[in-house]
Image (tube, rainbow, N blue to C red):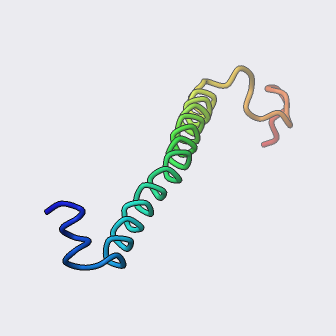
Amino acid sequence: MSTFDVLRRYGTAALLRFAGAVLLFLLLHLVRIPLVLAARVLEVAMRRVDGYAVRQASQRPQGPINHYFDRGEVPA
């Protein structure tokens, strides 16, 4: 069915509603693109921060853990 057949059978209003629906569909997808890109950037940043936090938390301590007492002055 061609555009002219739709126009003849259903009228101008139906054809305009269909064109409006197609344009709204395209507009929503164009709005979605920057949001998807922002989500990807945020995902990469969160992965890097998570990896940094895991590396820092899994290292062995460099010095004594109890900083309040020297090794010879631990109270009994």
- Tell how many labels: 0
Q: Quadrant of the C terminus?
A: top right
Q: Nearer the viewer, residue 66 or 56?
A: 56
Q: Is 65 above or below relative to 33?
A: above
Q: Is 16 above or below relative to 26?
A: below
Q: Position of residue 71 (x, y in %)?
A: 79, 26
Residue beneath the point at 58% across and 27% down: 55
Q: Quadrant of the N terminus?
A: bottom left
Residue beneath the point at 29% across and 78% down: 11
Farthest top residue in view: 62
Left-right relation of 24 to 67: left
Q: Nearer the viewer, residue 37 or 75?
A: 37
- Residue 45 picture quarter: top right
Q: Is 32 above or below relative to 72?
A: below
Q: Position of residue 68 (x, y in %)?
A: 86, 37
Residue beneath the point at 61% across and 24% down: 60
Q: Position of residue 30 (x, y in %)?
A: 49, 50
- Residue 7 picture quarter: bottom left
Farthest left residue in view: 1
- Residue 4 picture quarter: bottom left
Q: Is 33 above or below relative to 23?
A: above
Q: Nearer the viewer, residue 30 or 76?
A: 30
Left-right relation of 65 to 56: right
Q: Position of residue 22 (x, y in %)?
A: 37, 61
Left-right relation of 46 to 14: right
